[in-house]
Amino acid sequence: MNEYKFKLCIIGDGGVGKTSLTRRYLEGVFKANWKMTIGVDFYLKKLNFNDQKVSLQVWDFAGEEKFRFLLPGILMGANGTIFMYDITRYSTFNNLDHWLEVFNDTNKEHGQVISKILVGSKTDLNDNRVVSKDDAIRYAENANFSNYFECSSKSGDNVEEVFDRIARIMLEHATQLKVK
């Protein structure tokens, strides 16, 4: 059985639900008011896909502007990234360009290719939606994201699917590299 270790970064503005998504996935719990992440929090999850063992190192990055200078260092050596925005706060969707710019610059500077998916959070608040799903899908396609998901950490909708998909993308990429 092969064993893989992947570094997965989760980035986006403060308050979009990065910690809620991570904790819901890892622990199956939801709290409405997690403490603000300072810098980065680190978690570990072990998975099995067919005959592949995967250790997923999840790096939950703080979304406040004052921590952004840390992002290039966090992205170095990553295998995958989840970009998150809140479907009820248009500013978090607009700011994806800033996150993507740092992401692309870091990848270029370090000669790395990191798989990325886009996630719209807080679908349990769909009545307050300000970012249309069509706009998000179009953005994901134009910015070359591998996938687009919407999820709710509160209800658990699509949480497993988000992590399952990015883990499978990273695994596919790693096995392709092994074959070459």
Image: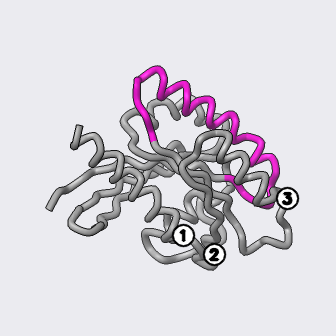
Q: Kindly give the residue lying farthest to the left in the view shown.
A: 1
Task: Left or right? Give the position of 139 relative to 9.
Answer: right
Q: What type of secondary structure mainly makes up the magenta span?
A: helix
Residue at screen point 17% across, 57% down: 2
Report, in whole angstroms, how far the alpha carbon at label 2 lies from the one at label 1.
10 Å
Q: Quadrant of the C terminus?
A: top left
Crowding near the residue tagged with mark 1, few <14, some 14–19, many ≥20 C-alpha atoms within 10 Å:
many
Residue 6: where, in percent of width, then height? 33, 49
Which residue is tagged 1?
A: 159
Q: Is residue 142 above or below residue 26?
A: above
Q: Is residue 23 above or below residue 108?
A: below
Residue 132: where, in percent of width, then height? 81, 58
Q: Earlier in the sequence, mark 2 or mark 3?
A: 3
Q: Kindly give the residue lying farthest to the top in the view shown.
A: 109
Q: Is residue 78 above or below residue 20?
A: above
The secondary structure type at the circle numbered 2 is: loop
Residue range corresponding to the magenta coloring: 85-114
The secondary structure type at the circle numbered 1 is: helix
Say which of 2 and 155 sits in front. Answer: 2
Q: Is residue 96 above or below residue 108?
A: below
In this view, the mark in front (2 or 3): 3
Which residue is tagged 2?
A: 154
Report, in whole angstroms, how far the alpha carbon at label 1 lies from the one at label 3.
21 Å
Name the quadrant containing residue 125. bottom right
Q: Is-magenta flag for residue 63?
A: no
Q: For the residue marked with disc 1, what is the amino acid?
A: Val
Q: Kindly give the residue lying farthest to the front in the view shown.
A: 180
Q: Which mark is residue 130?
A: 3
Q: For the residue marked with disc 3, what is the amino acid?
A: Val
